Amino acid sequence: MYEKYLAIGRLTRDPSPKIKPDGTMTCMMNIAVDTRIRREKTTKFITVFTQGKTAEHCDQYLSKWSPILVEGTIMEPKIYAGRDGQPRAGITMFAYNVTFLPGGPKNDGDKQAEPEYETISEDEIPF
């Protein structure tokens, strides 16, 4: 048996790195995933854990609002009481592969990266 889950979403805050006693780096991230079912839009929040080189790269290159694709397995859901007192289940995923998607913020702020264009004269246009 094999299970594999894919999710595409944006980080809701900066990654939280930690180092285990054995020296292995782990990283926790929270992503927001939008779904649309019959014109009704809902957002799911998923806690994602990574470790090793994947965790190091996530800590180094990702920040709040960065879009990512994660592949991994779903862990046992954690049941907790919401603000209204109702029981809720949190989705937790262990990601063994994280793909950085284009359209993330620049390192110096939360703005979208603007493409750089080369300026050419009208004489250089072939038509």
Image (tube, helix red, strand yellow):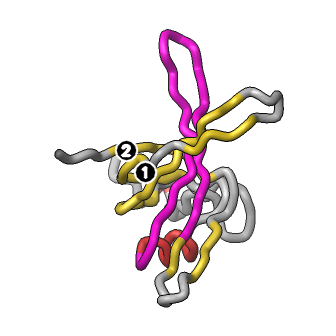
**29 is within the stretch colored magenta:** yes
Comparing 120 with 1, the one in front is 1
| Number of residues whose C-alpha sits closer than 10 Å to that of mark 1, classed few (under 14), some (14–19) or many (20 or more) | some
Which quarter of the rendered picture does the N terminus lie within? top left
Q: What percent of the width, then of the height, locates residue 106?
A: 65, 64
Left or right of 117, for residue 63? right
- The amino acid sitting under disc 2 is Leu
CB under 8 Å between discs 1 and 2: yes
Q: Which residue is mark 1?
A: 69
Comparing 120 with 78, the one in front is 78
First in sequence: mark 1 vs mark 2 = 2
Q: Which residue is mark 2?
A: 6
| Vertical side of 15 occupied by 56: above or below | below
How many badges with numbers are in the image? 2
| Of marks 1 and 2, the one in the foreground | 2
What residue is shown at x 41% (from left), y 58% (from top)? 95
Comparing 16 with 20, the one in front is 20
The residue furthest right is 84
